[in-house]
Image: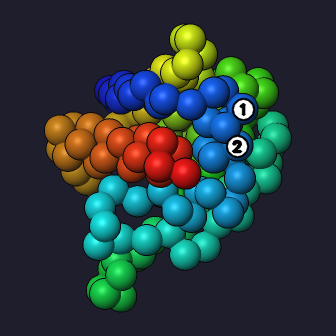
Amino acid sequence: MDRITVKTSVRADIDKVWLYWTKNEHIKNWNFATDEWCCPKVENDLKPNGKFVWRMEAKDGGMGFDFTGTYDIVIDREMISYHLDDSRKVEIEFTPMGNEVNMRETFDTEATYSKEQQREGWQAILDNFKKYVESN
């Protein structure tokens, strides 16, 4: 299994970035790759062995899926590590740099979509997060 890393820098302080990444009322506003999609349901128990369920759906109702997993490590305002229900691992690092937070998300690939499609999809969601934080 290969690993892919996507990155962004968010113009905000670490407290805001962490809050917007981890709280249900914010996750539903950015956790999708394009404007044709939405995230209508979020359950998020941010602690080691805590579970999460993020529902992603096409706004036209034609497609949807639950993104589900379990947190392994949570270091407040620094790092989150989790595994998806299909056993793939994901790590997100938060590094404050002046008036920005550098974010680095690394994930195990899966076999259904090409690596490039996966990179583009995960990067699009991270870019959507950046846009949401910086505009609110």
User: In this orientation, does residue 95 appear?
Assistant: no
27 vs 114: above or below? below
- Residue receiving disc 2: 19
Residue 61 or residue 95, whichever sits in front: 95
Image quadrant in which you'd find residue 114: top left
Residue at 70% x, 43% y is 19
Q: Is residue 16 left or right of residue 46?
A: left
Q: As rendered, which of 3 and 60 lies closer to the eye? A: 60
Instruction: Tell me which residue sits at (82%, 41%) in the image.
Output: 47
Q: Amino acid at mark 1?
A: Asp
The reply, left or right, for residue 99 in relation to residue 107 is right
Q: In the image, what residue type sits under mark 2?
A: Leu
Q: Residue at x 71, y 53 (%)?
A: 23
Q: In this orientation, which residue lies closer to the viewer: 115 or 10?
A: 10
Question: Are there few (<14), some (14-19), or many (20+) residues within 10 Å of tag 1?
Answer: few
Quarter location, residue 75: top right
Verify CB contact (< 8 Å) between mark 1 and mark 2.
Answer: yes
Relative height, residue 50 to residue 5 (above, below): below
Instruction: Give the residue displayed 61% in from the left and 73% down from the top.
Output: 41
According to the image, label 1 marks what residue?
A: 15
**From this viewpoint, is residue 61 visible?**
yes
Distance, label 1 to label 2, CA atoms, is 6 Å
